[in-house]
Image (tube, rainbow, N blue to C red):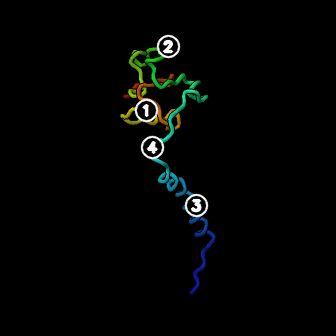
Amino acid sequence: MERKLSRRQLLRGAVTAAALIPVVHLGSRPAMAQERMPENDPMAKALKYVHDIDAHPDINRPDKAGVAGADQYCHNCALYVGDDEWGPCTIFQNRLVAAEGWCTAWVPRG
């Protein structure tokens, strides 16, 4: 016995399949970044990112949200993920940044 699909059933199936594509894609994304953010990257330069902020006393770190500039590091930024020496940063497309680093996008963890 041959079963025929109506146009409405075919369209409903296509819409359902299209809606699932983003969900399937998210499941295949890598969980952690693998590449370290180079300091000479144009985005890193624009945000004044450095791997070791203590080695750059010439960089002005303004106080933000009640946190002194001298106390701002990637490891205590809300955009930094993890507790390791290097961790993904959401502002740099999850590329790895140094825990002792800093950039102008620093935001306190809340």
Q: Three-letter amino acid code at disc 1?
A: Tyr
Query: Given the image, on which type of amino acid does mark 4 rest?
Result: Met
Residue at coordinates 44% horizontally, 15% vertically from top-left? Answer: 63
Q: Amino acid at mark 2?
A: Asn
Q: Nearer the viewer, residue 69 or 7?
A: 69
Residue at x-position 60% and y-position 75%: 5
Helix, strand or loop at label 4? It is: loop
Determine whether the residue tagged by mark 1 lies in a helix, strand or loop. Answer: loop
Comes first in the chain, label 1 or label 3: 3
Secondary element under disc 2, as helix, strand or loop, is loop
Q: Which mark is residue 15?
A: 3
Position of the C terminus by quadrant:
top left
Q: Residue at x 61, y 65 (%)?
A: 11
Reading the image, the residue beneath label 1 is 80
> Where 15 sits versus 70, above or below?
below
* Label 4 vs label 1, nearer the camera: 4
The x, y position of residue 50, in whole percent, is 50, 24
Check disc 4 and report the residue beneath it.
32
**Which label's residue is closer to the chain start, 4 or 1?**
4
The reply to whether discs 4 and 1 touch (Cβ–Cβ < 8 Å) is no
Q: Position of residue 89 (x, y in %)?
A: 47, 34
> Which is nearer the N-term, disc 3 or disc 2?
3
Q: CA distance from mark 2 to mark 1?
A: 20 Å
Which element is circle 3 on? helix
Q: Position of residue 19 (x, y in %)?
A: 54, 57
Image quarter (top left, top right, bottom left or bottom right) of the N terminus: bottom right
Disc 1/disc 3 C-alpha distance (Å): 37 Å
Label 2 sits on residue? 60
User: Which residue type carries mark 3?
Assistant: Val
